Image (cartoon, helix red, strand yellow):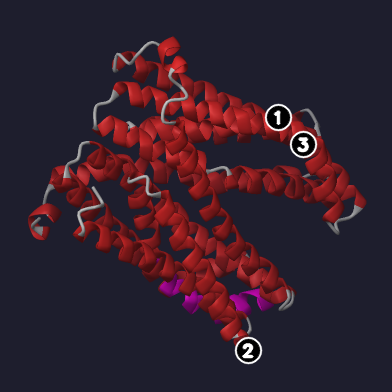
Amino acid sequence: MQVLPTLLDRAMHKKVLMLAIPMVLSNITVPLLGLVDAAVIGHLEHAYYLGGVALGSTMLSVTFWLLGFLRMSTTGLTAQAYGADNLKQLALVLIQGLAMALGFALVFLLLKPWLADRVFSWSDASQDVKFYGHQYFAIRAWSAPAALSNFVLLGWLLGTQNSRAPMWMVIISNLTNILLDVWFVVGLDWKVQGAALASVISDYTAMAFALCCVINTWRRQAMPALAAVIRDMANDIGRFIKLNRDIFLRSLCLQAAFSFMTFQGASFGDDIVAANAVLMSFLMIISYGMDGFAYAMEALVGKAIGAKNRSELSVSMLGTSFWGVVICTLLALVFAFAGEWLIKLITDIPVVQQQAKVYLPWLVAMPLVSMWCFLLDGVFIGATKGREMRNGMVVAASCFFIVYYACSSWGNHALWLAMLSFMAMRGLSLAWVMWRQWHQGRFI
């Protein structure tokens, strides 16, 4: 493959951007939802309402995030079936994914009372915060069937090279949540229960929209009858379960590193943990910017592998990587030249501003180091190589803890060095595996 002619290919850039930009735009509505949630609940007369929502929503967010492997596995398997023009397999992936999502949701709902009692008993929050957190959790938990199904539906639509439907799915969900938040909490004075109900309704609204898009695609592609697909649902289910298992274990390692970052930062004092929270919001900006291109990579790589087209695979990876480099270089420049202004925008507490400035250089380097793990995650998800992703994340998480404890005398700088090393090792481990398999002819 000739690099320069490929980079000058306008059709290639259009294909990448048509998949990536809608997902980036939809990601923008996520922090907007968080801001509106905080503003609406924070408008109430007592702080424990906001604390209760934060506690209850965190429990659900962590649970649902750990089950996010449903989206990743569905995207890769769908894209490969789409590339191979295998309509039966395309339908089978969707039905298997939805069955697994609903199964997890049922288990979660059955365990809901036990989970709530155990988790809230571990919290040191006040009784008022626990009461309203429990109230929020009890209502919001009923969104589990929709929330988990939405992972599968979004992944399936993306795997069929359709990024506009997932974009509108996320936007509709978040805008519905925002409007209902204002109506239920401010207009009807339903307080925490109103905020929880708004989230439940928004998840089911997104699911209804996504199902309409799936039905439209099903008819347009003249896919097999639903009854026939359900009869064959057990076919090749082992591969689906194994892939989900590996991605789940990968997610646990990722969660361990980020959780340690938060809790260990808290041991350095209130000012440090607040400064870290400000800088972690910069890391979220990187994530929102790169996720769209990682999703595009998943869809394009999966399609190329399904079609067994090595040339298309190379072009897709080069084109998406080019835009990843462009985005992350721009983010690094923004953090370098406007980082202090962004810190002041987020917090007006002088001591937190000062502490955040001390550790800002780590965030300037972060986009250029971390972009490779986002892009290579997309490659391996599209290639449905869950075992390699799992092993790479174990290596990276081990690197995180080794670097931190080796440099722990540096205090909070050791935490940020460990996080930078973690991101670098995620990319390096996957790059090594890919290089080896590519030259052995085992990648495609």
For the residue labelled by badge 2, is the local secondary structure a helix, a strand or a loop? Answer: helix
Residue shown at 78% from the left, 38% from the top: 136
Range of residues picked out in magenta:
350-367
Disc 1 to disc 3, how far (Cα)?
A: 10 Å
In the rendered structure, which disc, 2 or 1, sits on the residue that comes first in sequence? 1
Disc 2 to disc 3, how far (Cα)?
A: 42 Å
Label placed on residue 112: 3
Residue 78 placement: quadrant? top left
Label placed on residue 142: 1
Q: Amino acid at mark 2?
A: Ser
Majority secondary structure in the magenta region: helix
Horizontal side of 274 relative to 378 (left or right) equals right
Q: Residues within 10 Å of mark 2 (few under 14, many from 20)?
A: few
Mark 2 lies on residue: 409
For the residue labelled by badge 1, is the local secondary structure a helix, a strand or a loop? Answer: helix
Q: Amino acid at mark 1?
A: Trp
Image quarter (top left, top right, bottom left or bottom right) of the N terminus: bottom left
Label pair 1/3, CB-CB below 8 angstroms: no
- Residue 363: say if magenta: yes
In the rendered structure, which disc, 2 or 3, sits on the residue that comes first in sequence? 3
- Residue 82: say if magenta: no
Task: State the image coordinates of residue 274 (x, y, percent, origin top left).
Answer: 67, 69
Can residue 309 be seen by looking at this rendering? yes
Residue shown at 30% from the left, 15% from the top: 220
Q: Viewer-proximal residue, 164 or 81?
A: 81
Can residue 357 be seen by looking at this rendering? no
Q: Viewer-proximal residue, 291 or 121?
A: 121
Residue shown at 58% from the left, 65% from the top: 257
Residue 148 placement: quadrant? top right
For the residue labelled by badge 3, is the local secondary structure a helix, a strand or a loop? Answer: helix
Task: State the image coordinates of residue 58 (x, y, percent, origin top left).
Answer: 69, 49
